[in-house]
Image: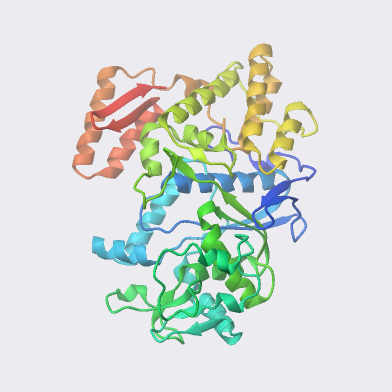
């Protein structure tokens, strides 16, 4: 559905489109005409978050990118089964839970709730399935057992089970590198128990220092799954041994996705996914945004300064495979650009909900843009051309088409007058009073109340920006 309030258009409001979608397949490294395995039905798996902390803008980029993918597939007449997993057990989660003095389940439940709040704020549709890794340990053990039976996995003296990459023909096909090329990038010492430095863990033996809720019984002894095997098991369980699209961030291409292919295809003897899609990085000062570099911004930090639809629009304006350069300047520009689209909608007293005719003019060019590897920059350019024509002609029909096309991208569903005039009734004293209340709430560690005040001000058209000098604000 469309987002951000008001009467939202549903993708089922649109007639089915003639399908000529081309997608850049990371496996073939070229654009390919898309055909689903089952006519009229697309099965898509996207790697989700490891829930030990709040989601950052890099996570938002991936979630929005594949939200657009599933929206366009639906607008094109497909039924979509969309799976986005949750990794709720790994070293970082165990470490953070121990640091906090809480159970792993307590930590991951809190972070999943926060993930949902952030995704909902950005207008991201919930996937059809959101499996947690810890609910599929038995599926993982089944795959590991098959791999061991086929001679593709081996046990170590320490109790781990590793995948033997040199036993599988074609390892490296996703990254496009040979085993020797992949080994040339090694920078860390290799465990003596590995037969080859590229071998990766399928099952990790439990350590005495790890909590009980990080351990499961298995034929190999008490332990827990490796990261890569989790996605193979969840994807197979929910989508089958072969499905249409597998997606994720570009940082997952190697080794995570390469290893998924190895263990899944090694176990099942058939192709894992026909199309592999990877969204580009978010960059800050030409460096990839990441927690390891400590240059990341959580979604909530960004939403402290900018309204959610502006953030979504900022992400959509860039093609999903390109780098997304984060800065206040770019977000400010996105906000002003979004205002121009809403200004066009405000020209008409009321903008009706209409079905789109994809054979005509603007809608046709929008479709051509989206059919070329989900070309949102070109699709957004069509929105601005249409907005200019609405401003010139004051045509209600064109305004309705603008709103309907915006709905496909999850944009332009707010009342334009409310959106453009929000915040003009609050005077400076009232704003400062609310800022003081928010500061007190944060001092009291009542972060829910502080976030509520920020959201209330945002609904009034007041954007807050926290800085070393204090909390600054501006009207939008």
Residue 461: x %, y % from top left: 40, 25
Q: Position of residue 148 (x, y in %)?
A: 55, 84
Is the C terminus in the top left, top right, bottom left or bottom right quadrant? top left
The reply, left or right, for residue 316 in relation to residue 470 is right
**Which quarter shows the N terminus?**
top right
Q: Nearer the viewer, residue 8 or 458?
A: 458
Residue 9 visible in the snapshot: no
Q: Residue at x 42, y 81 (%)?
A: 193
Query: What residue is shown at x 70% (from left), y 50% (from top)?
Result: 30
Snapshot quadrant of residue 178: bottom right
Q: Residue at x 56, y 48 (%)?
A: 279
Q: Residue at x 47, y 35 (%)?
A: 311
Left or right of 101, for residue 128: right
Q: Is residue 356 left or right of residue 95?
A: right
Q: Can residue 111 be seen here?
A: yes
Q: Quadrant of residue 299?
A: top left
Picture coordinates of residue 312 (x, y %)? 51, 37
Task: Out of 104 and 466, give the one closest to the viewer.
Answer: 466
């Amino acid at each position: 559905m469309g987002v951000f309030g008001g009467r939202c258009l549903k993708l089922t409001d649109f007639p089915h489109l003639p399908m000529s979608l081309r997608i850049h397949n990371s496996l073939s490294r070229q654009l390919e005409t898309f055909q689903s395995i089952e006519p009229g039905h697309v099965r898509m798996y996207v790697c989700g978050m490891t829930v030990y902390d709040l989601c950052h803008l890099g996570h938002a980029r991936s979630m929005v990118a594949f939200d657009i993918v599933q929206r366009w597939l639906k607008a094109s007449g497909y039924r979509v089964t969309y799976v986005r997993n949750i990794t709720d057990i790994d070293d970082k989660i165990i470490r953070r839970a121990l640091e906090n003095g809480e159970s792993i389940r307590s930590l991951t439940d809190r972070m999943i709730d926060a993930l949902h709040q952030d995704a909902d704020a950005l207008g991201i549709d919930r996937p059809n399935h959101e499996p947690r890794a810890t609910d599929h340990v038995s599926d993982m053990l089944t795959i590991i057992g098959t791999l061991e039976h086929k001679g593709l996995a081996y046990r170590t003296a320490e109790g781990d089970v590793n995948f033997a990459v040199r036993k599988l023909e074609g390892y490296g096909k996703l990254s496009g590198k040979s085993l020797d090329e992949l080994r040339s990038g090694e920078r860390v010492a290799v465990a003596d128990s590995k037969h080859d430095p590229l071998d990766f863990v399928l099952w990790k033996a439990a350590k005495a220092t790890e909590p009980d809720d990080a351990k499961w019984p298995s034929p190999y002894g008490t332990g827990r799954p490796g990261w890569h095997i989790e996605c193979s098991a969840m994807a197979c369980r929910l989508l089958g041994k072969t499905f249409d699209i597998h997606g994720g961030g570009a940082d997952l291409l190697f080794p995570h996705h390469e290893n998924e292919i190895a263990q899944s295809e090694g176990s099942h003897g058939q192709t894992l996914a026909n199309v592999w899609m990877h969204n580009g990085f978010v960059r800050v000062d030409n460096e990839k945004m990441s927690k390891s570099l400590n240059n990341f911004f959580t979604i909530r930090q960004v939403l402290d300064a900018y309204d959610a639809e502006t953030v979504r629009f900022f992400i959509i304006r860039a093609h999903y495979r390109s780098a997304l350069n984060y800065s206040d300047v770019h977000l400010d520009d996105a906000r002003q650009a979004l205002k121009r689209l809403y200004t066009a909608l405000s020209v008409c007293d009321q903008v009706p909900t209409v079905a789109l005719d994809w054979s005509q003019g603007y809608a046709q060019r929008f479709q051509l843009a989206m059919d070329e590897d989900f070309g949102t920059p070109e699709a957004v350019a069509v929105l601005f051309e249409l907005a200019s024509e609405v401003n010139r002609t004051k045509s209600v029909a064109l305004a309705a088409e603008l709103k309907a096309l915006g709905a496909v991208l999850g944009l332009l569903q707010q009342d334009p007058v409310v959106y453009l005039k929000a915040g003009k009734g609050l005077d400076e004293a009232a704003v400062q009073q609310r800022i003081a209340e928010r500061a007190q709430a944060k001092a009291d560690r009542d972060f829910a109340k502080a976030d509520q005040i920020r959201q209330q001000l945002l609904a009034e058209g007041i954007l807050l920006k926290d800085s070393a000098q204090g909390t600054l604000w501006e009207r939008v």
